[in-house]
Amino acid sequence: MDQQGIGTTNDFRLLPPPAPAAASQRAGLSHAADVDYRLKYRGALIGGAIGDALGRPWEARGDAAASRELSSLGRYRRWPGWAGGPTGTVTDDTQLTMCVAESICARGRVDPEDLARRFVEWMPVARGPGAATLEAVSALARGVAWDRAGAASDGNGAAMRVSPLALLHPVDVESLRGDSARSAVITHATPMAVVSAIAQAFMVAWCLHRNPGALTADTLRSELLAGLGVALDGVSEEAVPERRADRPGRFRLSERLAEAVQMPFASPPDAFLYFYNGAFVLESLPAALWCFLHHWDDPQQAIVTAVSGGYDADTVAAMTGALVGALHGEDAFPAPWVDELEYAAELRRLADSLLALAGPPLVTGASTGAEGRASLPADRPPLRSSAGT
């Protein structure tokens, strides 16, 4: 790499230093004997896709969802113009999550060059990609190296696709930090984007090891916040301005995440008014975390609440869905949500492959379930080009 590459002179700014001693144990990432990891792995990927599909009709429509009954927000709406296939159609959030998962399963590790290639091959069939991702992938397509292509963006594109890294490194904070950062900078090359990817990956991994029946709201909040502090210890952060005139100053993402844990809002509208929930990750990741914590014991309500905020509803709901899915497992979602979800079988296959890569003791004693590969009706484009498989 040349001297402008992220792999060289920018390492100290964008790639995290070694994790503190015994970080995984201190952060709460350790195998639990009383959870079913296969259901939880599937829940993380399927939950993210469910949130994406439910939020898709309300993305970029302001707060229009807030005036709808919550029950109506919990029903899929077919993508306009599509006559067949499942009603729970996904967007770039799930597409890119699957690209990450497929790359890991193919290579057995995080390979940034392979991941960058898959992003380029995804472009012709991209559904609603963000501006920063488009800019970065366009640069990759021109031959720019993966460690130089990332846009200077604090968008949520790095965090929304990071769940497979939690499934690859469920008990290893050091590897989770490094690979989350490498995955992030391919498209989003800022300290806040890196922090967002590490934070979301850690929270998904943390949820994998918890039995929700043994949790209380207070222990969930306190232990998750403590673990997140360990996971982000020493990671470079920048304070950035908010997009609102009534709160001048600069803020770090870790500060906003702590507020999401500690501040009890009276209602979802109050929380969304405080955090906002646009594509700026300083807004959307804290909003997703708040929705998760506010309804941690009710996965359906958590996702529908995330959808109700509108704006970047699909991504906020996708990140919320990954968290509740990792905590409760696939079985916690209503059968219609799973049965009508695009790529549900493919997501299960990827989750099972990632569980196999994680290895024992997580694999030992895991439940078995239906296998398969999702098929596409003839009237819809493939998720990615055939060259990417």
Image (tube, rainbow, N blue to C red):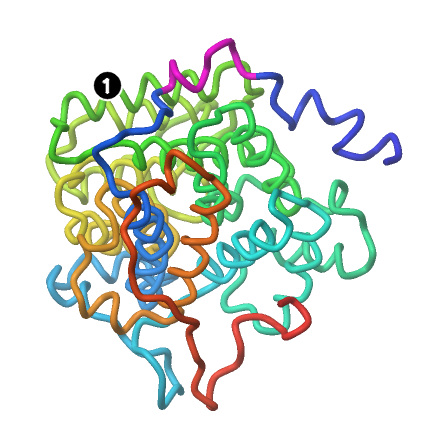
| 36 w.r.t. 6: above or below | below
- Looking at the rendered image, the quarter that the N terminus falls into is top right
| 173 w.r.t. 204: above or below | above
Residue that appears at 30% across and 77% down: 87
In the drawing, does residue 261 fall left or right of residue 379?
Answer: left
Locate residue 211, reporting x and y percent.
Answer: 19, 34
Locate residue 64, reporting x and y percent.
Answer: 25, 62
| 311 w.r.t. 221: above or below | below
Locate residue 137, reporting x and y percent.
Answer: 68, 57
- Looking at the rendered image, the quarter that the C terminus falls into is bottom right
Image quadrant assignment for residue 323: top left
Locate residue 339, reporting x and y percent.
Answer: 25, 71
Query: Mark 1 sits on what residue?
Result: 222
Does the stretch in magenta take in 324? no
Q: Which residues are magenta?
A: 19-27
| 345 w.r.t. 261: above or below | below
Residue that appears at 60% across and 54% down: 103
Looking at the rendered structure, the kind of residue marked 1 is: Ser
